[in-house]
Every structure is written in C-alpha cells, then in structure tokens.
Image (cartoon, rainbow, N blue to C red):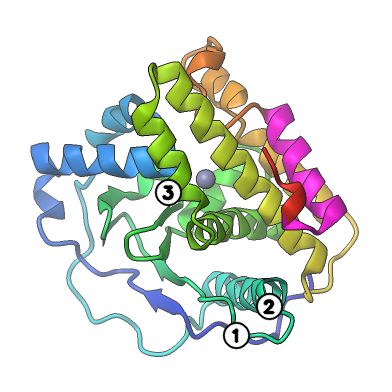
C-alpha cells in the first residue's frame, strides 16, 4: 500500500505507555468478569481469554502523559492513515452528499486498556466496544499477525483495522443489537456462536467493501496479504494451533475458508448490501 504522506485521522487516541489503574496487581475477579464481557462483545471464546488472564499484567508501563497530537511513529501513522481512509470511504457509502457517517475513535494502547466494555489485556487482540464506539488496538498485534500467524504485510494490518471498523458500521446500522438480542433468545451455546460467526463474517465482508473503495493506492500482492490474514485467523486454524483439535460448534468467527470467502465477497462487490451473512 502506498499510504505514506496521506492524511491522518483526527480520531486517534494514543494511550500507548499509559498505565491502567489496578492493572499492575492483576485483574482479579472483576477483571475476569470484564474480560468475559469483552469476550461476548468481540465474539472471542471467554475460556481461551481466561487462560490468558494469568499472563496479564506483570509489567504495565509506568504512568506517563500520552503523546500529544497524532502518532508520529511509522506504525502509529499507518494505523491513523488507514482509519482516515475508512472514514471517507464509509462517509461516501452512508450518504452520497457526505456527513452521514459518525466515525469511531481508535485507541492505541500497550498491554492493557480500559474501555466502556471493561478492562482488556492486549492478549484479547484488537476489538471494538459498541458502548463507547471505539476501536482498541495494541499495535504489537501486527507482529503477532506476521510472525505467529504467518500473515505479514501492511494490507493484512489494514484489513484488521477495517474489520473492527466493520463492527462499528454494524453498530451504526443496528445489526449488532439485533444479533445480541437474538443471542439472548438462543437456546444453546452453539446457536449463540453461530450468530457470532455471522456477525464476524459480515465484518470481514465490510472490510472488503472498504478495500474496494479505498483511495490508498494498492500494490501487487496487497489483496493476497489480506486474504492470507483472513485465512490465518479462521477459527479452525486457530483451534488447530491452540488445542490441536477442531470443534466447529464452538466457532465464534468462522472458518478460514468462510473468512476468505466473505472478505473476497466485499472486495468483489464493494456493496455492503451483499454482505448478508
Ligand atoms: Zn470481529
């Protein structure tokens, strides 16, 4: 992606290096409950997150003032430019005359962060909190994406941001509320998970819609990077990596094949109305 020198978003809150109160002493039961809340919102398996709890917060950084102004480091600038591009893209899709899209804030953090959905460790990965309409991103996830999941490249990273923005779009359109209401009525965990998968695959498709319309000039191999990332974070692939066995009824995000298919669908159509998962 040729993103350098492009406009950065005004909607970035840089909280990297900020200490989360209470984070240093471990999250405790309250934290565990909050993590469960985050898990429900992001669709992640809370059991997997609770295993991660023990790893949370040995060394939260010392308190310091957040850097003023937009991020000046390479990765921070990149995330900010991608966010700015999603703003103009979705604004144009929401209303041809502009102004119809309320952009989300993006919070950059390191290690742990407080959100209106609870305190979260970086281990939960990037997430969107509908309560405060903010995306939360620890940029070290991009390292993990590249090295642990084998999906390097700036477009792979942009896809992650665009997926979380996709959850914001779902929130604005009232789709998230509908799904959560349906989950309350669901008779089984498998049914609840199936609804979560549909929400996640739709966010992938909406990320594809952004990719179709982005004004950032793409380079050869970019789309493949995104598709590789979608495949890398499919539930089947992650389960194989984590526990060695694959249990489709516990999926909350969809298989690699499904994630690639819906991302591709968005890229092909560029039309959110075709994202009916
Ligand atoms: Zn998601």
Closer to the chain start, of discs 3 and 1, is 1
268 inside magenta stretch = yes
Mark identifier at residue 145: none
In terms of image quadrants, where is residue 85? bottom right
Label 2 and label 3: CA atoms lie apart by 22 Å
* Mark 2 lies on residue: 95
Q: Is residue 55 visible?
A: no
**Quick one: SS at disc 1?**
loop
- Asked if residue 15 lies left or right of residue 173, the reply is left
Q: Is residue 221 above or below residue 56?
A: below
Badge 3 crowding class, 10 Å Cα cut-off, few under 14, some 14 to 19, many 20 or more, is some
Image quadrant where one finds the C terminus: top right
Which tag, 2 or 3, sits closer to the chain's start? 2
In the image, which residues are magenta? 256-272
> How far from the left and from the top, in percent, is residue 165?
56, 61
Picture coordinates of residue 156 (x, y %)? 68, 52
Name the residue rendered at 39%, 39% in the picture: 181
* Mark 3 in CB contact with mark 1 (< 8 angstroms): no
> Which quarter of the picture shows residue 136?
bottom left
Q: Which mark is residue 177?
A: 3
Query: Does dot 2 land on a helix, a strand or a loop?
Result: loop
Q: Please, what secondary structure does the residue beneath circle 3 have?
A: helix
Q: Residue furthest right?
A: 220
Q: Quadrant of residue 81?
A: bottom right
Identify the residue at the far bottom of this view: 69
The x, y position of residue 256, in whole percent, is: 68, 29
Q: Position of residue 116 (x, y in %)?
A: 26, 60
* CA gap, disc 3 and disc 1: 23 Å
- The residue pinned by badge 1 equals 99
Q: Please indicate whether residue 107 sits to the left or right of residue 249 in the image.
A: left
């Amino acid at each position: 992606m040729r993103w350098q020198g492009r406009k950065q978003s005004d909607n970035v809150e840089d909280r990297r290096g900020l200490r989360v109160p209470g984070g240093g002493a471990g999250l405790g039961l309250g934290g565990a409950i909050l993590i469960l809340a985050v898990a429900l919102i992001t669709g992640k398996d809370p059991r997997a997150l609770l295993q991660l709890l023990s790893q949370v917060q040995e060394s939260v950084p010392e308190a310091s003032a957040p850097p003023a102004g937009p991020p000046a480091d390479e990765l921070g600038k990149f995330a900010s430019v991608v966010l700015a591009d999603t703003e103009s893209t979705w604004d144009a899709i929401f209303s041809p005359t502009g102004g119809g899209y309320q952009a989300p804030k993006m919070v950059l953090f390191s290690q742990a962060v407080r959100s209106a959905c609870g305190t979260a460790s970086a281990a939960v990965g990037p997430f969107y909190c509908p309560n405060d309409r903010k995306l939360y991103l620890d940029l070290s996830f991009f390292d993990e994406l590249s090295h642990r999941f084998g999906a390097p490249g700036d477009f792979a990273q942009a896809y992650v941001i665009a997926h979380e923005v996709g959850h914001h779009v779902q929130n604005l359109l009232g789709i998230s509320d509908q799904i959560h209401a349906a989950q309350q009525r669901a008779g089984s965990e498998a049914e609840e998970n199936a609804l979560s998968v549909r929400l996640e695959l739709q966010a992938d498709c909406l990320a594809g819609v952004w990719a179709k319309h982005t004004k950032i000039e793409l380079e050869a191999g970019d789309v493949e990077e995104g598709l590789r990332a979608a495949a890398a974070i499919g539930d089947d692939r992650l389960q194989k990596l984590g526990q060695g066995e694959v249990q489709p009824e516990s999926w909350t995000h969809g298989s690699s094949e499904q994630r690639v298919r819906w991302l591709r669908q968005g890229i092909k159509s560029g039309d959110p109305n075709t994202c009916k998962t």
